[in-house]
């Protein structure tokens, strides 16, 4: 959940022209990670839980791609990108145990 909150904070200063672009993409993929883990946890079978963890991993990779792109086009400073990517790395490790 912290990553999703940090994604919202990080995109708060994006240009208005990015509201339906990177701002939306980063916020949605960040929130989707937490939502998929929570939904999977609420399922009654291990198989269903694993399926939702895989969906969370997909959103995680999507978020990582958007963050890298934001660094490349200078929508975010490298330190902020690195911090968020560090968080995605930690979450990714916990999803594949």
Image (spheres, rainbow, N blue to C red):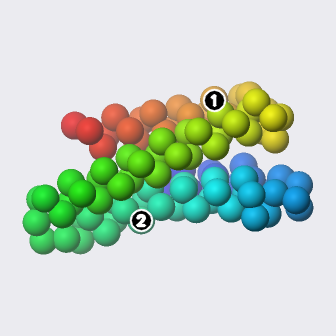
Q: Which of the 4 quarters of the picture holds residue 75?
A: top right
Q: Secondary structure at mark 2?
A: helix
Task: Find residue 13 and report its horizontal and vertical position in percent.
Answer: 84, 53
Residue 80 or residue 64, whichever sits in front = 64
Residue 13 or residue 70, whichever sits in front = 70
The residue carrying pointer 1 sits among few (fewer than 14), some (14 to 19) or many (20 or more) residues within 10 Å by Cα, namely some
Tags 1 and 2 touching, CB below 8 Å: no
Vertical placement of residue 40 versus 15, above or below: below
Task: Find residue 95 and report its horizontal and vertical position in percent.
Answer: 30, 43
Q: Which of the 4 quarters of the picture holds residue 23?
A: bottom right
Q: Which mark is residue 14?
A: none
Q: How many marks do you count on the picture?
A: 2
The residue carrying pointer 2 sits among few (fewer than 14), some (14 to 19) or many (20 or more) residues within 10 Å by Cα, namely some
Task: Find residue 57 and report its horizontal and vertical position in percent.
Answer: 38, 47
Give the residue displayed 13% in from the left and 59% down from the top: 47
First in sequence: mark 1 vs mark 2 = 2
Q: Is residue 76 left or right of residue 25?
A: right
Which residue in the protein does label 1 denote? 82
Q: Is residue 20 left or right of residue 95?
A: right
Residue placed furthest toward the right = 16
Quarter of the rendering occupied by the C terminus: top left
Task: Find residue 43 and report its horizontal and vertical position in percent.
Answer: 19, 71
Give the residue displayed 51% in from the left and 38% down from the top: 87
Give the residue displayed 21% in from the left and 54% down from the top: 50
Vertical placement of residue 9 versus 76, above or below: below
Give the residue displayed 43% in from the left and 59% down from the top: 34
Which residue in the protein does label 2 denote? 35
Q: Secondary structure at mark 1?
A: helix
Q: Which of the 4 quarters of the picture holds residue 8?
A: bottom right
Q: CA distance from mark 1 to mark 2?
A: 23 Å
């Amino acid at each position: 959940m912290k990553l999703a909150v940090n994604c919202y904070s990080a995109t708060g200063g994006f240009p208005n022209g990015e509201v339906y672009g990177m701002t939306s993409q980063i916020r949605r993929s960040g929130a989707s990670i937490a939502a998929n883990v929570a939904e999977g946890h609420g399922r009654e079978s291990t198989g269903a839980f694993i399926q939702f963890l895989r969906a969370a991993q997909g959103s995680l990779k999507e978020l990582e791609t958007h963050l890298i792109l934001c660094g490349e086009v200078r929508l975010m400073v490298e330190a902020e990108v690195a911090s968020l990517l560090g968080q995605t790395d930690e979450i990714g490790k916990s999803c594949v145990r």
